Amino acid sequence: MLATTVAGIVSISAAAIFSFTLLSRVVERMVSLSVGIMLSTSLLHALPEAFESGADPRTLFGTLLAGLLAFFMLEKLAILRHSHHHEGDGHHHAHGHDKHEAGRAGWMILLGDGMHNFTDGILIAAAFLADPHLGIVTGVAIVAHEIPQEIGDFIVLLNAGFSRTRAYVYNLLCSLLAVAGGLLGYYTLDRASNLIPYVLVFASSGFIYIAVSDLMPQMQRRATLKETVPQVLLIALGVCIVLFLTAEKHAH
């Protein structure tokens, strides 16, 4: 419980410091970095880990499909609720609608991040049960892996209109799901470990959907060469960050 709590607080706080001080003035541009981090975390780290677990590939692909459709339906419900709330009020909502479009991505990334943190808690519990030293190393590795991902989350939340305090509090609450995952992993390890690949795939589906459906269309609205070059470079930087940390994790 101590390891999962500290890992969550340290990663969230470090990401908040970087996001609020160094990145707050360039939030829109840094959405590109978030896309690179989320896609590479999902496609180069979480999904390979799930498929290497020995779980049935067809079932994992089915989970991925179910996750994508589930996030699609969540977004549909958000759109329908927004339309019903404003229909017939006689006002135009172009700017507010844009904010709401970004806001949906914020809420969905919190859901996906909560699932991911829950899985991290299970992994930390499994490592501690195998060897306390391995548990500490795993906790440190997860913190190192989470910081750039949480920076990406903060960028999305700030872009979605969340205040700094609100973004920090919601992200911190999501991080506490690692404690719940740790408790579940400790008391029902065998059953929980069988579920890890599917939780990883479902969480990855959320990150992929948010990046492709919500964030990349925002980037496509800025189609000039002056805007495109930094976008591509920042996406590449996000991919490189995850590749470096993944390589470090495998090396240890």
Image: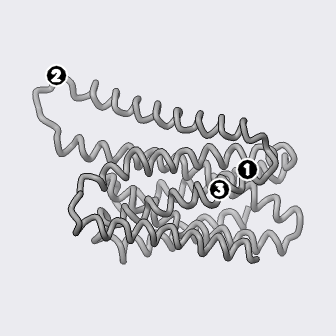
The percent coordinates of residue 129 (x first, y second) are 87, 62
User: Of the residues shown, which amino acid type is indicated by label 1?
Assistant: Phe
User: Which one is closest to the eye, mark 1 or mark 2?
Assistant: 1
Where residue 207 appears, as percent x and y from the top left, is 51, 50
> Considering only vertical position in the picture, is 110 above or below 21?
above
User: Which label belongs to residue 88?
Assistant: 2
Q: Secondary structure at mark 1?
A: helix
Q: CA distance from mark 3 to mark 1?
A: 9 Å
Residue that numbered label 1 is attached to = 51
Residue drawn at the location 78% of the way across and 40% of the way down: 56
Q: Quadrant of the N terminus?
A: bottom right
Of the pair 78 and 64, the residue shown nearer to us:
64
Which mark sits nearer the N-terminus, 3 or 1?
Answer: 3
Please give left or right for residue 129 compared with residue 136 in the image.
right
Find out whether the residues at labels 3 and 1 contact each other: C-beta distance under 8 Å. Answer: no
- Give the foreground label among 3 and 1: 1
The residue at 33%/49% (across/down) is 217
Tell me how the rendering is colored: one colour
Residue 76 relative to residue 222: left or right: right
Residue at horizontal 30 percent and vertical 52 percent from the top = 218
Label 1 crowd bin: few (<14), some (14–19), many (20+), radius 10 Å? some
User: Looking at the picture, which amino acid does disc 2 mark?
Assistant: Gly
Circle 2 — which element? loop
Q: Which residue is mark 3?
A: 46
Q: Looking at numbered disc 3 in the image, what kind of residue is underneath it?
A: Ala
Near mark 3 (Cα within 10 A), the count class, few <14, some 14-19 or many ≥20, is some
Residue 219 or residue 103, whichever sits in front: 219
Quadrant of the rendering where the C terminus is positioned = bottom right
